Image (tube, rainbow, N blue to C red):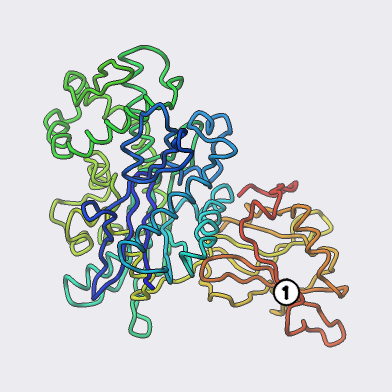
Amino acid sequence: MINIGIDFGSTYTMVSVYEGSAPATVQPDGLSYSYPSVVVYDKRKEKYICGKAARSKIGSSQTIAFRGFKMLLNQQMSAENLALRGYDSEHTPERITAEFLRYVISNTLRVRGEDKVGTAVIGAPECWFQSLRTVDARGTLREICSSMTDLVERVRIVSEPTNAAAFCVWNYEQEYKEPLNGKILVVDYGGGTLDTALVDVRQNGGKMQIKPEMRSGAGENRDNEIGEAGIAFQEAVARMAISEALGGKPEEIPCDSHFNQFLKSLEEQLLSATAEIAETMDEYSFDTDGLRDELFCDVEYHGEPVEISYYQLYACYQNVIAPVLQRVLDETTADMKDISKLRIALVGGFCNFYLVRKQIYDYFKIAQIDERTKGMIREEEQRETAIAHGAALFADNVLTVCNIAQFSIGTYARYPDGSLFNRFAINFGQEIVADRVYFALDDNGAPFHMIAGNIDKFLLNFGKRAETAMPMKPKPEFAAQLKSIHSGYVVVIGFSMDAGERITVHVYNYDMNLERREEKPIASLRLSTLKDMFENIVLSGSGGA
């Protein structure tokens, strides 16, 4: 049995294990170090093909190609736009994700000669930890992997920049032969999301412990665009180039097999021309007139050559990427008094793109040789392996990560004036001990008790501002469960979170005579995903999450 770390990326997926004394990437085929995050459905054979074999079939009329499906787990794209990308009631993003990850895990076991995975730590975008609109994507991913009981015993979802920070901490110790203590800012830019995390590194019982402190990110799908990172940038370049060469509005270009083939060719060109892009951008000092005349490459679309200029790369970056990166960096550093001494690590494939790197270096005023980046990433290719390697370190318990609550949850009542009476059991930013039951406390510090008839009044909040608290109405099936479990007139509600960040609601009877709750809960209900339990109705007078 082995433990594995998975960097489930929007464009590429990588698996690492901790062996000997270092994390190592598991080669899918003995040649490459990653799986293209691509699935195609072969209509003739009625079966799914994943990874490298799937990528080679993009553009075939007998297949349906699925890309960026990870970013579609957050349910932020309309059914109409999903259909344009080939999804329907049979080929859902959840089904495609399950097929792909089963393939990746099965192949890893085959390559390693093992029968089962003990612990799998899987990276998730930071934006999946930040709002009610996206948090269920994390729960969905966890449930997809946890359902593979024939392949995996335990699953934990850890944010991608936190995984990367773990590897940077380990890297530093290998380089300087001493433990790192202090704070690291990780900027992780991949195919679908931009994630940042400020983590505090400390020693705890002889082991390094990673505690996330400030986190930010971007990557929610908008309209027909996937995320706000590499894929969105590539699609914007493709639509702009095709529109200018062949006519038509960029937004009306269909996401069909021809477009996917165009994107495949464009991606290959971008990956192979990293140095050339840097030299050309520097040569023209971002002079837009000069960049218009410089051909980057040409790509075929419907049998017609389409030229892509350096200006189009620059213009799409300024429109799609630059404002998002600026906003996230501002959010991350807003409460920092001095960023000049902060250790900084750049990870993720898109951080290799010249314009991304330049914007970040300019923001933090980083020189080519800078103490703030030393020891974090020792080799360029580690920018792409950092997340998987960090996840492998967590999976094998080489390092530990603090379980920090990413939202508040509790119960509520109403004051006579109609305002909310908040009682949170778990608070945003609180360090949580796995499986410990936490209670909302009254003004005397005792577990808050409530009338059994109000047992369905749950309150969620993302962030520190109390005014954003959101009362949640249980769906009928969940409400029926709640009503059927209490046996007394007054109850106490407790909440726990396991190592996989699943929340469980615990209901205790309350003895009014002894003025205490009973020792054992009369029922415990696990909330797999919030969307399956709540209707998410915002009551009058409360803010949105």
Q: Is residue 396 above or below residue 429?
A: below
* Label 1 Cα neighbours within 10 Å, binned few <14 / some 14-19 / many ≥20: few
Q: Residue visible at 55% across and 63% down?
A: 428
Q: Is residue 31 above or below residue 525?
A: above
Left or right: residue 102 compared with residue 55: right
User: Residue 116: image x %, image y %?
Assistant: 42, 68
Task: Name the quadrant containing residue 326.
Answer: top left
The residue where tag 1 is placed is 442
Q: Amino acid at mark 1?
A: Asp
Left or right: residue 488 compared with residue 128: right
User: Residue 114: image x %, image y %?
Assistant: 36, 69
Q: Quadrant of the N terminus?
A: bottom left
**Towards the viewer: 498 or 96:** 96
User: Residue 495: image x %, image y %?
Assistant: 65, 70
Q: Residue visible at 27% across and 64% down?
A: 168
Disc tally is 1
Q: Residue visible at 19% across and 26% down?
A: 296
**Towards the viewer: 443 or 261:** 261
Left or right: residue 514 compared with residue 38: right
